[in-house]
Amino acid sequence: MKRSFVFIIGILLSTVAMAAGTDDIVGVWLTAKGQSEIQIYKEGNKYFGKIVSLKEPNGPKGNPKVDANNPDDKLKTQPLLGLVILRDFIYDDGEWNSGRVYDPQNGKEYKGYMKLKDPNTLSLRGYIGFSLLGRTEVWTRIK
């Protein structure tokens, strides 16, 4: 009887340890193509992500790369470094959802959700309308 009790407690504790915690996503992540590093951080109860490093931070004339594809003309000259590309994600049952993903390569914003595959692998899905119409990227945590 005592062994059964210890076994059940062990199973319960290991299940709890494996579940993603609300802030497990916080940190710096390398994007799928390795072109940039994104810092995911928490403000209030929401999660955001900003570009903190670019493989090629400068354009052809040596000036910092800017958000040239932004549909708002006033924002086309803002630097990509420091640009918030993930916003308003909320943790819910093992994933971060209800957020928005901005793609500076095309200047478009998408609905999105994120989920940890393991502590060092993040799956990010951006989509239009339904999650079936979108793209998934896998990012790697930078230690």
Image (tube, grey):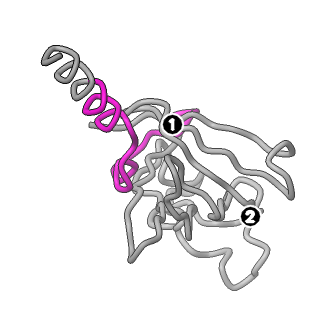
Badge 2 marks a residue whose secondary structure is strand
User: Vertically, is 35 above or below 92?
Assistant: above
Specify the quadrant of the image occupied by residue 8: top left
Q: Residue at x 22, y 29 (%)?
A: 9
Tell me if 102 is positioned left or right of 65 in this view. right
Q: Which residue is mark 2?
A: 109
Q: Nearer the viewer, residue 142 or 111?
A: 111
Q: Which residue is mark 1?
A: 139
Q: Residue at x 44, y 66 (%)?
A: 82
Which x, y percent locates residue 99? 62, 64
Which x, y percent locates residue 42? 38, 67
Q: Residues within 10 Å of mark 2 (few under 14, many from 20)?
A: some
Number of numbered tags placed on the structure image:
2
Disc nearer the start of the sequence (1/2) = 2
Q: Nearer the viewer, residue 59 or 129?
A: 129
Badge 1 marks a residue whose secondary structure is strand
Query: Which amino acid type corresponds to the residue marked 2 in the rendered image?
Result: Glu
Distance (Cα) linking label 1 and label 2: 19 Å
- Furthest-left residue in view? 2
Which x, y percent locates residue 33? 58, 33
Q: Residues within 10 Å of mark 1 (few under 14, many from 20)?
A: many
Give the magenta-colored segment's residue range: 11-34
Q: Residue at x 41, y 51 (%)?
A: 53
Q: Nearer the viewer, residue 32 or 71?
A: 32
Query: Which amino acid type corresponds to the residue marked 1 in the rendered image?
Result: Trp
Specify the quadrant of the image occupied by residue 86: bottom right
Which x, y percent locates residue 5? 20, 23
